[in-house]
Amino acid sequence: MTIRSRFVEPLPICSLQTWIFGSATEELPDSQKPVFIDADRPESHVVSRSDFRLLSKRIALGLINVGLEPQDRALVYSGNTIFYPSLFLGVLMAGGIYTGASPNFTARELTHQLRDSGAKFVFAAPENLPVAIEAALSAGISPSRVYIFGADDYRAIPQFVAFSDAHNNGPRHWTELISENEAAASDWVWFEPKDPASTTCCLNYSSGTTGVPKGVEVTHHSYVANCVQVISLLNKAPGIEEFRQRERTLCFLPLYHAFAQTYFGAIFPALRVPVYIMAAYNFERMLQHIQNFRITTLVAVPPVLVSMAKNPIAKKYDVSSLENISGSAAPLSGDTIEEVGKMCSPSASVRQGWGMTEMTCYISSWDPNVKNESASVGELMPNLSARLMQLDGKTMITRPRERGEIWLTGPTLMKAYWKNEKATGDTVHVDGDGTRWMKTGDVGFVDRYETGALFYIVDRIKELIKVKGIQVAPAELEATLLENEHVSDAAVVGVTINGHEVPRAYVVKPGGSQITAEEVAQWMSGKVSKHKHLKGGVCFIETVPKNPSGKILRRALRDRAQKEIGDRKPSDSKLV
């Protein structure tokens, strides 16, 4: 049985850049309104709507002039700057394909993405330049195609001095692309795809939590469709027009990732919402910025919200300006949502959603007029449909609250995994009528089998722990652990001991807590069924390893667990 969204939204047929700006040359409404503000230099480093469009066009023209052709790839290896969104859109305006890499990548990791994507140009932050050059050479890319992409205001750089005497063979500064083209760019009309539904605009690499990261082909149409979905739900909030006049948001999530890219590079600029951009995430600096700039809208990942709820530092700052807080990437406990809500505006909503790179970004969220059910990730975004399938992939589930793998279809479904037919075939099921379904790998259930059903995510199929044949969801145990005031963060993995898989917890204690591993395990035993007891033990760690989108790096913890206790017998009392 198919569950459909109760919302249907018309979708424009155009490029992402046309959806954001409308015209390439006509005067923009609110043209001088700030869209990007450097949170550390708010007085001097500001990009207006007009600046945003013009700089994007100048970058596009510069790329075309140095040889970028339609569907060529340009990779950005940088942290956040107020010019990052212009670089992103500049690649698209030139007809190219953008791909972003984590600024924390090693040369080996970056080389993989350069080779896999076939990138023709690389933009690297100054501090990342040595690694970028090493990776580019390993991937067969000339250093002359590597551009230094810094955070200093391009309008204040009169001339760039080459890093290399043989300038033609060395890296260049990104401002060389725009050095003499402002007048030409003003009247230039960007690339507009003939078929936005088949023209790739981004290669957003999946997190790689279950294997080597794969490039996800997102088309212009899919990107626009996801933006329209998100805005259509946001616009249902009572008093939204008045709220928009004072709305402002803070970007501390990495802009190379699909989550931040979609919100801060497309949705908020299209809504003309000012975005204060942090170069990198720092918890206390984030709180300071929320207080100082009276931020109203926060888009975050669960670890940030957990810290807000549990870290004593948060009590030092006034974040009562927050009215709209959304989290995604991992489950949020009801206690976390409640604690964060107490810190915000009395009318604030704290809601969690669900998304994945293969569906462009967001999949489910909340109608602002529907009472939030903290354990749920909301209902399907407009224009999406879902099925719940038994794990054999053949039998459809039709009963409420019965768990199964969630399959999805709709206009935001990826085109394919980049040059990986096998992975695409394993992940995308095609019905006899040609309908394509994304097998999400997420296990969940719905509260009812009808339009508007609320979805609940249990865990990833590949992360479920099998205890004597019974499936145990790590996310459920983690949410339970976070109810304990002596646990500020937690991760649970399965460890095989003498042929039997059991749960093992890695726990972060808040400062000053004297709780022991035995006490955590005993407390947990009173909260969950016997097969969910932490018979693999409890281990205290400084931080839970996570990727930039907030997903726990379980593979690393599973490997660690097996090395630590893989030769011991399961025990209720032998805890680490």
Image (cartoon, grey):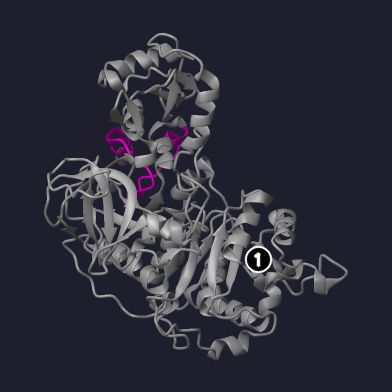
Foreground: 416 or 503? Answer: 416
| Image quarter (top left, top right, bottom left or bottom right) of the N terminus | bottom left
Magenta span of residues = 313-340
Q: Which residue is drawn at 68% across and 80% down?
A: 66
Residue annotated with mark 1:
122
The part of the image, by quadrant, that contains residue 260 is bottom left
Q: Is mark 1 on a helix, strand or loop?
A: strand
315 part of magenta stretch? yes
As shown in the figure, which amino acid type bears the numbered disc 1? Val
Q: Residue at x 32, y 33 (%)?
A: 473
Q: In this view, does 360 lie to the left or right of 183?
A: left
Give the number of marks.
1
Foreground: 520 or 30? Answer: 520
Q: Tell me residue 427's x, y (percent).
A: 37, 55
Q: Which residue is drawn at 62% across and 82% down?
A: 64
Q: Which residue is drawn at 39% across and 64% down?
A: 414
Mark 1 packing: few (<14 Cα in 10 Å), some, or many (20+)? many
Q: Is residue 364 left or right of residue 153?
A: left
Q: Decide: is 309 above or below 116.
A: above
* Res. 199 in view: yes
